[in-house]
Image: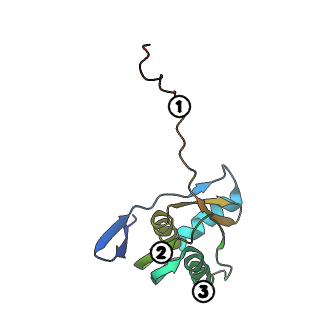
Amino acid sequence: MWKPAVAVLGAAVLTVSVHAQSTKNGDPKAQQLEAKLSRIVIPHIEFEDAGLRDAINTVHRRSMELDPDGEGVNFVVHVEGDERKVALELNNVSIKSVLRAITLLTDTESEIEENIVIIRSKASAAPKDPKPEPPAGRGP
């Protein structure tokens, strides 16, 4: 059973439900990495107005320290635009939970490809097949 992670942002408290990252179908390396993200638990992690890349670098370092195999988790950050900021404090949570909280707070998403977690900007939601409005003063 999982417990929700709680990120504290100033006076607001954000409860984060943890869902699986997107993985490539049937890729054994991706499945192994997803299991590792759930298995490695970070006792305490805190960011106070940290940049996204700095936060992910910290998660990477902690994954290497806490991974029984000593390999850790590989991350690639591919985000365009301004540096996104992370402010959170979490206790006894899996790397999967930390990653979910970070992506939620920075409006990014993660995807597992082979043995790498890729963090990228969310795809912009463009309207599908927009219908132009008729010119004013003309009937249908």
Secondary element type, mark 2: strand
Side (left or right) of 74 relative to 89: right
Q: How far apart are marks 1 and 3 (CA)?
A: 50 Å
Label disc, if present, on residue 114 of the rendered structure: none
Of circles 2 and 3, which is in front? 2
Label disc, if present, on residue 86 of the rendered structure: 2
Asked if disc 1 and disc 3 are in contact, CB closer than 8 Å, the reply is: no
Q: On the image, which quarter does residue 30 sit in?
A: bottom right
Residue 64: image location, x then y, percent: 63, 82
Q: Nearer the viewer, residue 52 or 100?
A: 52
Residue 78: image location, x then y, percent: 66, 65
Label disc, if present, on residue 130 of the rendered structure: 1
Query: How many residues crowd mark 1 within 10 Å: few (<14), some (14–19), many (20+)?
Result: few
Q: Distance between the residues labelled 2 and 1?
A: 35 Å
Secondary element type, mark 1: loop
- What residue appears at the point 62 percent right and 64 percent down from the top-left corner? 79
The amino acid on which the numbered mark 1 sits, given as a three-letter code, is Pro
Q: Which of marks 2 and 3 is nearer the N terminus?
A: 3
Viewport quadrant of the C terminus:
top left
**Where does label 3 land, which residue?**
65
- What residue appears at the point 40 percent right and 65 percent down from the top-left corner? 2
